Amino acid sequence: MKPTIHFNERKGLCMPKTDCNFQVGSMSNRGGNNSRRASILAVSHDYFKNEARTTFATEAAFFSVIVMTAAVPLIYSAMAVVHLVRSFAAV
């Protein structure tokens, strides 16, 4: 239901006063002893059996690409530092 807004003017302040008529829906078919609902153990077992393997393989592949991408500049930086140290030692 759409809320009805009334303005409450008090001491120079104009603040909206909201009146909402909220009605709770019926939830009679939602019980705690529903035998059709899967347990958390069954859901987690199904997830790790089917989905986690492909997710892990994909994430491992992306991680290796990121590590290789980050390793190249680090190796070149280390080589440049070694070259700098050798140039100072030769003087």
Image (cartoon, rainbow, N blue to C red):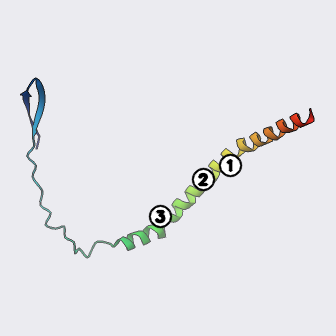
Task: Return the disc, 2 or 1, that comes first in the chain's sequence.
Answer: 2
**What secondary structure is marked by label 1?**
helix
**Residue at (19%, 67%) from the top-left corner?**
30
Between marks 1 and 3 in the image, the one whose residue lies nearer the viewer: 1
Tag 2: amino acid: Phe
Q: Earlier in the sequence, mark 1 or mark 3?
A: 3
Measure the alpha-carbon separation of dots 2 and 1: 9 Å
Disc 2 marks which residue?
63
Residue at 44%, 67% (x, y): give it.
47
Give residue 22's position: percent from left, percent from top.
10, 49
Give the residue type that dot 3 points to. Glu
* Side (left or right) of 30 relative to 88: left
Quarter where residue 10 is shown: top left
Q: Position of residue 38 (x, y in %)?
A: 32, 72
Q: Residues within 10 Å of mark 1 (few under 14, many from 20)?
A: few
Q: Amino acid at mark 1?
A: Met
Q: Quadrant of residue 32?
A: bottom left
- Label 3: how many Cα within 10 Å (few below 14, some 14–19, many 20+): few
Q: Secondary structure beneath disc 2?
A: helix
In the displayed structure, does residue 74 sit left or right of residue 79? left
Residue at 22 percent across and 75 percent down: it is: 33
- Of the two numbered discs 2 and 3 in the rendering, the one whose residue sits closer to the viewer: 2
Task: Tell me the tag on residue 68.
Answer: 1
Q: How many marks?
A: 3
Q: Residue at x 27, y 74 (%)?
A: 36
Q: Secondary structure at mark 3?
A: helix
The residue under label 3 is: 51
Q: CA distance from mark 2 to mark 3?
A: 18 Å
From the top left corner, tell me how far across and down residue 61 is, in percent.
61, 55
In the rendered view, tell whether residue 57 sits above or below residue 6: below
